[in-house]
């Protein structure tokens, strides 16, 4: 077993173990953190495939941003586990059927019959000057340019739709207008009152409120 | 086998040669911070430990190491102790790809810029987990603030970096510096001026430094995410923060101020006069300049209010970067000199 294989088995084990923990851990925050570890191990496996752009982007996008927001939400939730477990027995048969269907589909698609050296040639290692980023960019912006752009537009539509759904003006809500705040001048806020310089009673009335 | 062992030893030696100066720099950055901010505010700063206070950081470190680490009763013990390590790990790991000169680096990977961005984006976990595991309201508020802030500013930061790699045509940090070769005006600060400013501001926010230190906010939420930490577990958070500050400063000088290139390049007399200065000196000088800027800003500006922070990030910085990306793209395609006509 060479070093690369050792790394592969190490990260594959970490991936499977943490993926299992995502669905078995009781505490949702711990489960979310296990998901972080799963993504990270997945990125390491991609790195072993010489797909450094995808690997680093997986860490950057999923670990660095998506999971942070996930944790953000999960931490604030007040999840009542007893309530969640209600009706577990009643819904169990449906769950089992769905689970079996999903397992069947996955075995059909990624089962051992579809893989192996006779289906795919053994991947060849690239030389040191191979750039996965350049290779990906070249394919993405030439062969797949239309699907790529369409996917981008769909995502943009989703962003705009989400914002317009979430953004609503409440009539009694208070809003700040930064332009007005910046445009404020001294005379709008401050009134200079002539003081009595002689020290007579009432001259420092302002201090004694 | 022997070869592999030798490689391992060499790599380990390189790491030690990088980390020891880094830790010393972190220690003395805290000293510099107290001194510089002291002078800005008309004080003198630490003065009593050692000659003119020069041993103060050592004394601080000794104090932190010998203090007891208190774990709150309601805290999640495992995550509470994991959080400082998660904060520290990324801020050290990012240094692996930093080039200090043409042949002076630990590793030289193709996607260096992307790697740095990805690794620094992980350091937020330390803060979030610290806030949650402490089981304390103030710490939790700090964690939530930090999560929202870092995710928002990472977008502006990422876009600024896209501008750099467009201009340089490479994600390798060494090649980014080499593509700025020529003279002071060839450096990317000029064609990428808005991105340069945006990157530094986003860097301030990413490192949780004033005026973006809402995660700490000592006047509102006591000390934010690390309010329950004591002793060295608290110290590690600070090590991470200062290591991140140095990292951002060095990245800024690598990407926008020509890294180890001499500022006198291309000037007839001065170039030969200063040619004996090793490149790393220029790099460290530029880095120190940005560190000074970090401290100067902290001493000058009040903390942002939360909504102002979000407004600045989403409505000002991100639109600026997007517009300037279009400008840079057009300039690269059009071969605008003197920066992009070579490629």
Image (spheres, grey):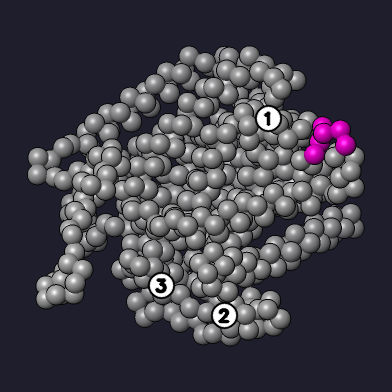
**Chain bearing mark 2:** B
* Quadrant position of the N terminus of chain B in the picture: bottom right
Q: Secondary structure at mark 1?
A: helix
The residue that mark 2 highlights is B64
Provide the chain ID for the residue under circle 1. Answer: B
Q: Are marks 2 and 3 on the same chain?
A: yes
Image coordinates for residue B304, horizontal then vertical, percent: 37, 53
Residue A67 pos. (x, y %): 42, 48
Q: Confirm whether the magenta stretch covers residue A68.
A: no
What number is the disc on residue B168? Answer: 1
Q: Earlier in the sequence, mark 1 or mark 2?
A: 2
| Alpha carbon distance from label 3 to label 1 | 43 Å
According to the picture, the residue beneath numbered tag 3 turns out to be B227
| Rendered view: A4 above or below B11 | above
Residue drawn at 64 percent across, 75 percent down: B57
Q: Which residue shows up at 33% across the image and 71% down it?
A: B136
The residue range painted magenta reads: B264-269
Residue B267: say if magenta.
yes
Q: Which residue occupies the foreground of this view, B22 or B270?
A: B270
Give residue A113's mark: none
Check the residue under mark 3 and report the chain it is in: B
Image quadrant for the C terminus of chain B?
Answer: top right
């Amino acid at each position: 077993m060479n070093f690369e294989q050792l790394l592969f088995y190490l990260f594959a084990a970490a991936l499977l173990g943490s993926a299992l923990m995502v669905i078995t851990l009781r505490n949702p925050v711990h489960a979310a953190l296990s998901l972080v570890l799963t993504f990270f191990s997945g990125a390491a496996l991609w790195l072993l495939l010489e797909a450094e752009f995808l690997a680093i982007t997986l860490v950057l996008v999923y670990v660095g941003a998506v999971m942070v927001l996930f944790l953000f939400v999960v931490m604030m939730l007040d999840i009542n586990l007893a309530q969640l477990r209600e009706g577990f027995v009643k819904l169990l048969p449906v769950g089992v059927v769905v689970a079996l269907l999903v397992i069947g589909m996955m075995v059909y698609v990624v089962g051992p019959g579809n893989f192996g050296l006779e289906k795919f040639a053994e991947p060849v290692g690239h030389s040191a000057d191979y750039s996965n980023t350049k290779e990906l960019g070249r394919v993405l912006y030439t062969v797949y340019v239309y699907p790529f752009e369409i996917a981008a537009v769909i995502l943009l539509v989703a962003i705009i739709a989400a914002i317009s759904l979430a953004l609503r003006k409440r009539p009694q809500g208070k809003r700040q207008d930064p332009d007005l705040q910046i445009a404020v001048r001294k005379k709008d806020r401050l009134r200079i009152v002539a003081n009595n310089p002689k020290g007579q009673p009432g001259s420092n009335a302002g201090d004694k409120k | 086998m022997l070869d592999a062992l030798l490689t391992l030893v060499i790599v380990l030696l390189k790491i030690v040669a990088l980390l020891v100066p880094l830790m010393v720099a972190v220690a003395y950055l805290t000293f510099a911070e107290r001194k510089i901010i002291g002078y800005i505010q008309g004080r003198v700063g630490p003065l009593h430990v050692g000659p003119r206070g020069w041993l103060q950081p050592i004394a601080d470190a000794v104090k932190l190491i010998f203090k007891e680490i208190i774990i709150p009763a309601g805290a999640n013990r495992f995550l509470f102790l994991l959080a400082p390590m998660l904060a520290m790990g990324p801020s050290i790991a990012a240094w692996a790809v930093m080039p200090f000169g043409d042949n002076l680096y630990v590793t030289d990977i193709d996607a260096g810029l992307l790697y740095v961005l990805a690794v620094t984006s992980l350091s937020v976990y330390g803060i979030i987990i610290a806030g949650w595991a402490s089981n304390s309201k103030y710490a939790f508020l700090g964690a939530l603030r930090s999560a929202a802030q870092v995710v928002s500013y990472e977008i502006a930061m990422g876009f600024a970096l896209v501008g750099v790699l467009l201009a340089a045509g490479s994600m390798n940090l060494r090649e980014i510096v080499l593509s700025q070769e020529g003279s002071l005006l060839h450096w990317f600060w000029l064609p990428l001026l808005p991105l340069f400013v945006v990157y530094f501001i986003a860097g301030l926010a990413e490192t949780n430094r004033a005026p973006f230190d809402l995660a700490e906010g000592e006047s509102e939420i006591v000390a934010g995410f690390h309010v329950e930490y004591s002793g060295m577990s608290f110290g590690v958070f600070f090590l991470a923060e200062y290591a991140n500050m140095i990292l951002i400063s060095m990245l800024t000088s690598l990407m926008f101020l020509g890294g180890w290139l001499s500022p006198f390049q291309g000037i007839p007399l001065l170039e030969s006069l200063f040619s004996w200065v090793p490149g790393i000196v220029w790099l460290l000088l530029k880095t120190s300049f940005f560190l000074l800027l970090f401290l100067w800003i902290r001493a000058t500006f009040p903390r942002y209010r939360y909504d102002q922070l979000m407004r600045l990030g989403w409505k000002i910085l991100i639109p600026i970067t997007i517009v300037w990306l279009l400008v840079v793209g057009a300039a690269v395609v059009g071969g605008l000199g003197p920066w992009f006509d070579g490629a």
